Image: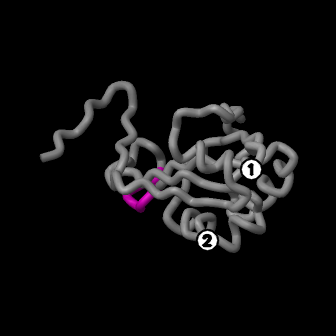
């Protein structure tokens, strides 16, 4: 028997390494009632306002009824997730990690093995060899 899929929303946040370490902690995620997809950023993203410290873009997933709890958990690290756009996650999503999130009751953290580069409109992508 299949469980009904969860209704989820997601928001995007930019985190420092210290903030990311706290918010990727399993117990903290359970208490805060959210799941994550984490994308490490290339170290040379001064343009994104994070200097040279490691930084991460995260998609924060949660059930709409838990929004106040989730917002409070993030506010404890001086991150106001309510400032970013709230997107509804399609229950029939083709994104594999999102499929897992809508089908499970546990909080999950997916961490990308690839570094991502943030570019301003007037900058070109670096050559990687």
23 magenta-colored: no
Q: Residue at x 64, y 71 (%)?
A: 26
Q: Left or right: where does residue 112 sit relative to residue 5?
A: left
Disc 2: which residue: 25
Residue 100 appears in view: yes
Element type where label 2 sits in the image:
loop
The disc label shown at residue 124, or none: none
10 Å crowding of disc 1: few (<14), some (14-19), many (20+): few
Q: Left or right: where does residue 102 sit relative to residue 96?
A: right
Q: Residue at x 63, y 64 (%)?
A: 23
| For discs 1 and 2, the disc positioned in front in the rendered view | 1
The disc label shown at residue 1, or none: 1
10 Å crowding of disc 2: few (<14), some (14-19), many (20+): few
Q: Residue furthest front?
A: 1
Q: Are marks 1 and 2 in contact (CB under 8 Å)?
A: no
Residue 85 appears in view: no
Measured as percent of width and height from the top left, residue 77 is found at 68, 63
Name above or below for residue 43 compared with residue 83.
Answer: below
Q: Earlier in the sequence, mark 1 or mark 2?
A: 1
Q: Residue furthest top?
A: 122
What's the CA distance linking mark 1 and mark 2?
31 Å
Element type where label 1 sits in the image:
loop
Measured as percent of width and height from the top left, residue 35 is found at 65, 55
Q: Quadrant of residue 51?
A: bottom left
Q: Residue at x 84, y 57 (%)?
A: 69
52 magenta-colored: yes
Q: Left or right: where does residue 115 sit relative to residue 32?
A: left
Residue span colored magenta: 50-55
Q: Please, what is the dominant secondary structure of the magenta stretch?
A: loop
């Amino acid at each position: 028997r299949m469980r009904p899929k969860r209704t989820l929303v997601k928001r995007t946040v930019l985190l420092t390494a210290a903030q990311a370490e706290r918010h990727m902690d399993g117990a903290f995620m359970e208490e805060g009632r959210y799941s994550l997809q984490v994308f490490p950023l290339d170290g040379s993203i001064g343009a994104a306002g994070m200097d040279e410290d490691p930084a991460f873009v995260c998609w924060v997933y949660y059930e709409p009824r838990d929004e106040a709890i989730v917002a409070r958990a993030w506010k404890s690290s001086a991150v106001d997730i309510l400032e970013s756009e709230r997107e509804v996650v399609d229950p029939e999503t083709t994104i594999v990690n999102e499929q897992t999130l809508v089908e499970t009751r546990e909080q999950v953290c997916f961490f990308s093995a690839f570094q991502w580069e943030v570019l301003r409109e007037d900058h070109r992508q670096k050559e990687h060899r």
